[in-house]
Image (cartoon, grey):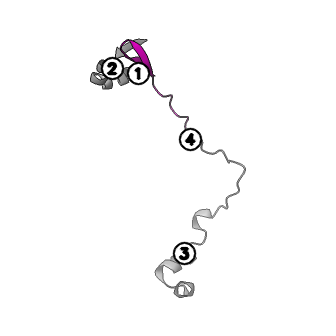
Amino acid sequence: MKTVNMHEAKTHLSKLIEEAVKGEPFVIARAGKPLVKVSAIEAAPAKRTGFLKGQVDCPDDFITMGEDEITALFDGSDDRARS
């Protein structure tokens, strides 16, 4: 594993990080003493989709449920909108 001094790390930080992301971690040292290890963060697991499949019932007309009532509320033709 590569060890770089503080000044070199400041000067070449972008390049060093690119290398770390590619799987080449490095250590930053001050006065020859290792201070920190820099390595890439593992990718977060993908978000799960469909994990409730089979556990939730959704009506076939879910997309259009209440469409007439909602439209009436927006266009002002519903008496409840005036209350």
Q: Nearer the viewer, residue 54 or 20?
A: 20
**Between marks 4 and 3 in the image, the one whose residue lies nearer the viewer:** 4
Q: Residue 78 got which mark?
A: none
Q: Would you call the spot at circle 2 few (<14 residues within 10 Å), some (14-19), or many (20 or more)? A: some
Report which residue position mark 3 lands on. 70
Residue drawn at (29%, 18%) of the image: 8
Q: Would you call the spot at circle 4 few (<14 residues within 10 Å), some (14-19), or many (20 or more)? A: few
Spatial CA span between label 2 and label 3: 63 Å
Amino acid type, label 3: Ile
Spatial CA span between label 2 and label 4: 38 Å
Q: Residue 47 got which mark?
A: 4
**Between marks 4 and 1 in the image, the one whose residue lies nearer the viewer:** 1
Spatial CA span between label 4 and label 3: 32 Å
Q: Nearer the viewer, residue 79 or 29?
A: 29
Report which residue position mark 2 lands on. 6
Amino acid type, label 4: Lys
- Residue 63 position in % (x across, y down): 58, 63
Per the image, label 2 sits on a secondary structure element best described as: helix
The mark nearer the N terminus, 1 or 2, is: 2
Query: Among all residues in the image, which is located at the extreme left?
Result: 11
State which region is magenta: 25-47
Q: Would you call the spot at circle 3 few (<14 residues within 10 Å), some (14-19), or many (20 or more)? A: few
Amino acid type, label 2: Met
The quarter of the picture where the N terminus appears is top left
Q: Which image quadrant for residue 6? A: top left
- Residue 31 position in % (x across, y down): 35, 14
For this view, does 25 lie left or right of residue 81? left
Q: Residue 20 got which mark?
A: 1
Amino acid type, label 1: Ala
Kindly indicate whether the residue at mark 4 contacts the one at mark 2 (C-beta within 8 angstroms).
Answer: no
